[in-house]
Each structure stands twice: as C-alpha cells, then as structure tokens.
Image (cartoon, grey):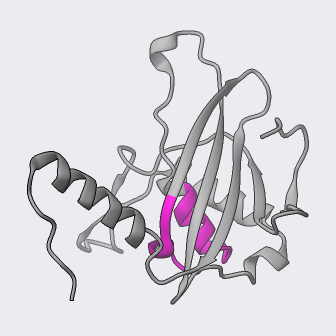
Amino acid sequence: MPYPDRLVVGQRELSGNLIIWVPGKLVRKSNQRKLRQRGRGGRPLITKSDAAIQWIDSLLKTLPGWITEQKLGGAGNVLHLDFWCFYRTPKNPSHEPDLSVELQLDGLQKGGAILNDRYVYSYSAKKVMTDGPQGVVVEIRQTHSSNPHLQEGLALLKELAGLTGEQPAQQG
C-alpha cells in the first residue's frame, strides 16, 4: 500500500474495491467513554469520548456523497476490510498507541459506506508509525456469500480432529 500523500477517495480500477483515506489523528472507542446524564436529573448514560465523537464527525465530512449511498454489506453480501492506520511516531516508544478499529467501523456505518458492521466477516489492521500525516486508509471488499469461512473452518476442524485422534462428525 503506497503512503497516501493526499486525500484519496475512490475505487481501485482493477479490483473495484472501495478505498477511503480519512485524514486526522486516530482515537480509540474503548477506554475513553464518558459518563453523562440524560437531561436534568436523568439516568446516567455512558457515551463515546469527545475525541471519538469529533473523529466520527470528521470522517462524515470527509466522505463524498456517492460513498454514503454505497451501503455495502447485507444479506448474502459479506465484507472484508483492510485498514492501514497511520499514527504519529511517539518520542517515547512506550507511548505507542494500541491498534483498534472499532471506531472506524462505527464511522463507516454511520457515514453509510457500509450497511452495518455486523456484516464485516473479517478485517486486517496494520499499524504504520510515521512523521507524516496521520489517518486511516480503508479498503472494503464485498463478496457474495452467506458464510465465507465455512470451508476454511471445516478444513481446520478436520485438521484439529486429526491431531487429537478424534473422528470429525459426519454430515448427512
């Protein structure tokens, strides 16, 4: 994946996969929640941090209109996502951020690029430490399968059963 030196939003010509570059400092969804109250004297409510809300707002402003109409995923259409997360290189190596894509999935769903993050059957995430711009590149691939990992899972089950000496259950 080449380093993005400018805003890149579009479709890769050869594969047809949707590729999105969202600039800005990446934040995490978990471990930064806030306790708020619903209205005056209302029940407590746990919400995302202000930084997480601002990041999603920035993602929504970045996405052009045609992406918000994609709504990829759904019954029979599962998604595979690849993330390249560009973080600023910290001065102290022990302050290197954790790799987390939960917030990016929420933002893609809220922005309409994907119908629902429950249709994401697999993703890979790569952390890239840089002194250049921060942000995330997301490549979204859609496949037409109701259960994309069935054959892979059955092969693994058979292999594990062979290692333990047990016979796998016969389908019939």
User: Quadrant of residue 26 in the image?
Assistant: top right
Quadrant occupied by the C terminus: bottom left
| Residue 136 vs residue 92, the one in the foreground | 136
Q: Is residue 5 above or below residue 41?
A: above
Across and down, in percent, residue 89 comes to 64, 19
Q: Is residue 36 visible?
A: no
Q: Residue at x 59, y 38 (%)?
A: 126
Tell me where residue 147 sits by quadrant: bottom left
Residue lying farthest to the top in this orientation: 92
**Residue bounds of the magenta highlight:** 104-122
Residue 120 belongs to the span the image colors magenta: yes
Residue 65 visible, this angle: yes
- x%, y% of residue 60? 71, 66
Q: Residue 1 appears at what percent x and percent y? A: 77, 40
Q: Position of residue 5 (x, y in %)?
A: 89, 37
- In the displayed structure, does residue 73 sit left or right of residue 153? right
User: 17 or 90, which is in the foreground?
Assistant: 17
Identify the residue shown where x is 54% and y is 49%: 124
| Rendered position, 166 above or below 146 | above
Tell me: residue 6, above or below residue 20.
above
Q: Going 49% across and 38% down the picture, which residue do you hit?
A: 99
Which residue is painted at 34% across and 61% down in the image? 155
Q: How many marks?
A: 0
Q: Looking at this view, is 77 or 172 the one in front? A: 172
Residue 165 located left or right of residue 67 = left
Of 10 and 79, nearer the camera is: 79
Query: Is residue 49 on the magenta stretch?
Result: no
Q: Quadrant of residue 158?
A: bottom left
